[in-house]
Image (cartoon, rainbow, N blue to C red):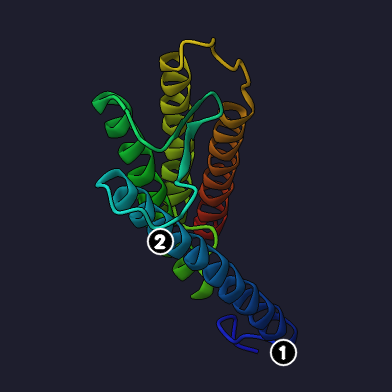
């Protein structure tokens, strides 16, 4: 049997992986569409075109929420847009990672880079959230769950990278 051939058992597993990837892509794409729709409604309300009769209530962090009419400081709006941009970059990187997984490239240097980038995006988003909380002037929500999640994702990427290196060394051993 050729080492490059895919066994029926492995093929069934890859089919399951591909189905789950399609589901994840659908859910993430739906979240992006909702972000865009509600973002447009927010900016329309900000510009004076009221879409919702009760106005829009927007939360930029757990402690920082504004309601219509908006009096949002420019720095808060910029940080909120940066958080939205981080989300969209994260979605793009996630889709690249899912493309690799769909192709069967699980433990490659490129997939490890994508996972590390996702980790960095989670940590930077945590930092932006804490800055926005501080701007609320009601205190800072001292939760570290998002920071721990980012560090955990980085740890998983590091372990995957070390495993990949061990596998490459074993393949070169005669």
Residue at x 49%, y 39% (from the top left corner): 119
- Mark positioned earlier in the residue sequence (1 or 2): 1
The quarter holding residue 23 reads: bottom right
Residue 60 is situated, as x and y percent measured from the top left of the image, at 45, 34
Q: Is residue 96 above or below residue 138?
A: below
**Cα distance between the residues tagged 1 and 2:** 43 Å
The residue wearing badge 1 is 8
Residue 43 is situated, as x and y percent measured from the top left of the image, at 30, 49
Q: Quadrant of the N terminus?
A: bottom right
Helix, strand or loop status at disc 2: helix
Total marks in image? 2
The residue wearing badge 2 is 37
Q: Is residue 153 above or below residue 14?
A: above
Q: Is residue 162 above or below residue 172?
A: above
Q: Is residue 121 found left or right of 20 in the rendered image?
A: left
Outermost right residue: 9
Residue 133 is situated, as x and y percent measured from the top left of the image, at 48, 20
Residue at x 40%, y 63% (from the top left corner): 96
Q: Quadrant of the C terminus?
A: bottom right
Residue 144 seen in the figure: yes
Of residues 44 and 12, the one nearer the viewer is 44
Disc 1 crowd rating (10 Å Cα; few below 14, some 14-19, many 20+) is few
Tell me the number on the disc at residue 82.
Answer: none
């Amino acid at each position: 049997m050729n080492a490059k051939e895919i066994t029926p058992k492995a093929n069934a597993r890859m089919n399951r992986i591909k189905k789950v990837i399609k589901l994840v892509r659908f859910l993430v794409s739906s979240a992006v569409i909702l972000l865009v729709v509600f973002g447009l409604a927010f900016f329309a309300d900000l510009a004076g075109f009221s879409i919702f009769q009760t106005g829009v209530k927007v939360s930029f962090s757990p402690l920082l929420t504004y309601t219509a009419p908006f009096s949002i400081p420019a720095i808060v709006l910029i940080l909120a847009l940066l958080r939205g941009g981080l989300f969209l970059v994260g979605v793009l990187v996630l889709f690249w990672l899912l493309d690799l997984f769909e192709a069967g490239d699980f433990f490659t240097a490129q997939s490890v880079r994508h996972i590390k980038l996702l980790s960095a995006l989670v940590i930077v988003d945590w930092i932006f959230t804490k800055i926005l909380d501080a701007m609320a002037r009601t205190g800072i929500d001292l939760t570290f769950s998002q920071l721990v999640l980012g560090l955990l994702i980085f740890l998983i990427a590091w372990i995957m990278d070390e495993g990949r290196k061990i596998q490459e060394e074993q393949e070169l051993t005669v």
